[in-house]
Image (cartoon, rainbow, N blue to C red):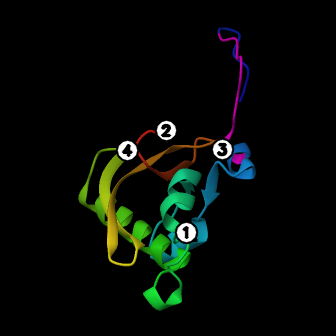
Amino acid sequence: MTPDKDWNVVFEYSRAQAIADGVLVDVTDAARGVGFKVHTVVTATLYHGYVVPPAGLDGSFGQSAAGRLHDVLTLALFAARASKGTDRVYFKVDFLMAPGKTETVDIIAHIGPGDTPAPVLTIMMPGDD
């Protein structure tokens, strides 16, 4: 960030630092595979709470972090394509949390500048921003 003589910056926390700290999880490669063209992250809350399958949901239930992430990214892409002229879309994803038990989760996808003016995508839960 370039210092501005009209502002006194007290604290700065970059997107790169958040990724290095594990607050954000870089999923750009998977997002490109779905059709996104920008750097993409999901918040650690979403990733560890829902994308990573809970203990007990092994392969016999057809659950994997890669598959669940693909579902989130695909639904984010559908929501983004259906919504024009906004930097934020809202959508829901159903996650299998235990055998026979699903949980519907509200998710937000936000596009805007990151550490540079280039657009980046952040996928998060309400309250994560």
* Residue plotted at (52% across, 58% down): 49
Label 4 and label 1: CA atoms lie apart by: 27 Å
Q: Which residue, given by chain and number where applicable, does mark 3 sit on?
A: 15
Label 3 and label 4: CA atoms lie apart by: 18 Å
Q: Which circle's residue, 3 or 1, is located before the other in the chain? A: 3
Using residue 51 as the reference point, say whether residue 76 is left or right of it: left
Look at the image and give the residue range highlighted in magenta: 7-16
* Residue plotted at (68% across, 45% down): 18
**Amino acid at the residue labelled 2:** Asp
Q: Which residue, given by chain and number where applicable, does mark 1 sit on?
A: 52
For the stretch drawn in magenta, the main secondary structure is: loop
Disc 4 or disc 1, which is closer to the eye?
1
Disc 4 or disc 2, which is closer to the eye?
2
| Res. 129 mark | 2
Q: Quick check: 98 above or below 58?
A: above
* Residue plotted at (70% across, 17% down): 9
Label 3 and label 2: CA atoms lie apart by: 12 Å
**Amino acid at the residue labelled 3:** Arg
| Res. 87 mark | 4
